[in-house]
Image: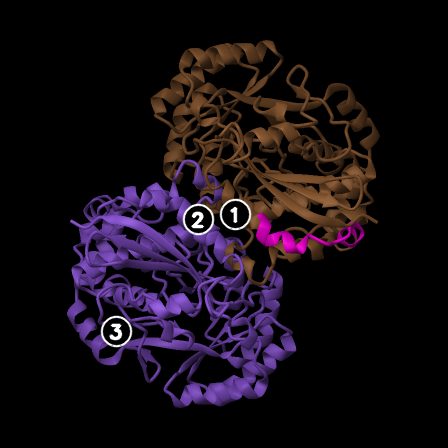
Chain colours: A purple, B brown
Amino acid sequence: MTTIVAVQVHDVRFPTAATGDGSDAINRGDYSATYVELRTDGPHTGTGFTFTNGRGNELTCAAVRALAVHVTGRTMAELAADPVGFSRSLTADPQLRWLGPEKGVLHMATGALINAVWDLRAKLAGLPLWRLLAEMPTEELVACVDFRHIGDALTPADAAAVLDKGLIGMPERRARLERDGLPSYTTSVGWLGYPDAKVTALTRAAYAAGWRAMKMKVGGDIEDDVRRAHLIRAEIGPDALLMMDANQVWDVDEAIACMRRLAGAAPYWIEEPTHPDDVLGHARIQAAVAPIRVATGEVAANRVVFKQLLQAGAIGVMQVDACRVAGVPEVLAELLMAAKFGVPVCPHAGGVGLCELVQHLAAFDMLRVGASTDGRLVEYVDHLHQHFTDPVRTRGGRYLLPRSPGYSSTLRHASVAEFAFPDGPAWR
Amino acid sequence: MTTIVAVQVHDVRFPTAATGDGSDAINRGDYSATYVELRTDGPHTGTGFTFTNGRGNELTCAAVRALAVHVTGRTMAELAADPVGFSRSLTADPQLRWLGPEKGVLHMATGALINAVWDLRAKLAGLPLWRLLAEMPTEELVACVDFRHIGDALTPADAAAVLDKGLIGMPERRARLERDGLPSYTTSVGWLGYPDAKVTALTRAAYAAGWRAMKMKVGGDIEDDVRRAHLIRAEIGPDALLMMDANQVWDVDEAIACMRRLAGAAPYWIEEPTHPDDVLGHARIQAAVAPIRVATGEVAANRVVFKQLLQAGAIGVMQVDACRVAGVPEVLAELLMAAKFGVPVCPHAGGVGLCELVQHLAAFDMLRVGASTDGRLVEYVDHLHQHFTDPVRTRGGRYLLPRSPGYSSTLRHASVAEFAFPDGPAWR
């Protein structure tokens, strides 16, 4: 019986702003992590994090400290026996909830803590998280989901039906994923900070490395966006997928007008065309730009927002984020709703360690929930993997299935020390 | 020319949890304020705050510190000349925005800072805020609104039309408000923590004091809710208004079912029937429970959520909050949208100092935006007013118009010292 005896949180920041990596229409920062370690009375440490953009990482760290009271002293047996009770102790704390509810700083901190618990759970089981989840009995998975406020879109019976159906053919799907890896796409080619020549060179290199799906940032000057889109399309030919990401800058009507201009480059999806809270706006855009798909989710606050995006037919691709919502159980709710509504999930990655996390979620989805690789592509960004003890491995534009026990969420001690803010050597 | 030379923030907490005041279906805490003072090179200090529920107030305080860089050193002339630029320096900070965007801890801190700027602006003008706003030229008010992401519901021309129309008959409306005060309702009668006898006694006392509109909390055991509703209805007779507040606990279908049970007590509105992010859910509930009105907004994250509630016909009453969104300019956007869509605004109050703030917003709305008192009731809760230098004054169930320059947002020095957390005498 393992007990969590202490919660430690580290403010870790990588100075990425200077290079233009990760710059888009609205974000420009130092990729950072609110990094949580759950110390136990056993040999294992659970690790989890939420990703932030530099300044403000102290806020999510402080939120972890505020929430830690609900984690410290708990046994893993207790938490596994009542996963919804545990989630609600964090998401419905009668004083802290006012600061959300279930959104922003507080919810991101909740995600870091709950993810650390799941990392620990997978380590104790001796399995990579994707496998722990894929092989879990249906009733145990259903018991992890908090159906409150999503009952009008997904019932426990709906969830069980999806998960039972997902058992059919799972061994064959797993053999294929073990052999071929997970389909993915790269976002490393077209950040707004990059000049045209760099975009062309990166696109060419990515294509040569096997990538057949690439994403560019849009939402700057529309003429620049159109020119860059055609540059990339010329490099990758008509068959590869080109995705576009506006990072929320457009108004609804502006998004529709801009996508008319960009349609000539045959985009597969337009990501974050407008404000992430605007369900009705996304629905209008989706209706206007079809067959281009609307994609969103990296800053969708919680399962209630995803529920509505699905109910309104507002998205053709659902982009879950591993650590903006309340960790593995809330992502599970989102995957289940996507499966019920027939929308493919293409998780958001990049940042610090998001690739490491979402490969587990995507593999689980492809094996057991969506139960298919059709239309499913995991984002890949080639940043900062070297700081993790179990970094992602790719081959020919595909993620290889992770093998180590846990959630691949553990940072190297040396990296935590080097990039600790404000006192680590990198920041002094 | 006044310059803001320093931003000071105070963590002020009142130990209210012990009494059951402010307890409802999901919140139970110590009413607190993240209290901001803007020191200037002149005689005035601008004050603003956001309200929180106890633990976690340190997070909004830390967020104010993170945002203060955008306020310190600015002149009031600059901020008045480019109000949208100023708002966006806070709401679209390229590193901090990731922690929202425009929601939760970060947005609440933004509200505290921007409200303090408007308090200072009103003090410099020598006017109470409601009057500064009501008498401001239309183009100057329109220039305060950030239309990004709401352009599909409200254009600058729409806003100008509303505000110009609001000038018609304003002197007569003002004379009436000066004479009669603002229509309001009281929430002090039916908190979930109160026993039946206390509910009856408080209802009787409120009726005797002139209140003809009262709100009770629901969302506990439905039989208890029904019994208490009929107790209050019996006390107040058939003509007074009874409002109900579920504080988000119900699922969509559960809300519809519970309101069928409660309809016998003839409620005027049902407030927060389900999760505040669920625009589509509120729309379904509104369609099902009409003519009972759905009311929400106290934790609506921002103007994009309000926009959708209006577009979807999801609410019959809009409840703006003075300090969850980005201060006076974002509330102005919300009031303008409500006026365009023909939905009355009944601001959320209570907590710490919310009554002090919203009386200004409601008076401005009644004078210039909604330009009517019809269907408009300001929430009143009789808590903690004694800690303010310019507390609300009521007479016969109505707020009297505030007279002192500013936003009535200034706490007494002695109260800030006494209730400073964790070192003030009240907490030691």
Asked whether disc 2 touches disc 3, contact meaning CB atoms under 8 Å apart, the reply is no
Magenta segment includes B69:
yes
Examine the rendered structure and indicate whether residue A334 appears above or below residue B119. below
Circles 2 and 3 on the same subunit: yes
Of marks 2 and 3, which one's residue comes earlier in the chain? Answer: 2
Q: Nearer the viewer, residue B291 or B77?
A: B77
In the rendering, at what x and y percent does residue B134 appear? 78, 37
Q: Disc 3 is attached to a residue of which chain?
A: A
Q: Nearer the viewer, residue A217 or A127?
A: A127
Disc 2 marks a residue whose amino acid type is: Ala
**Residue plotted at (35% across, 82% down):** A397
Q: Disc 1 is attached to a residue of which chain?
A: B
Residue hosting label 1? B105
Disc 1 secondary structure class: helix
Q: CA distance from mark 2 to mark 1?
A: 10 Å
* Circle 2 Cα neighbour tier, 10 Å, few/some/many (<14 / 14–19 / ≥20): many
In the rendering, at what x and y percent does residue A286 appear? 50, 63
Residue hosting label 2? A63
Q: Which residues are magenta?
A: B64-80
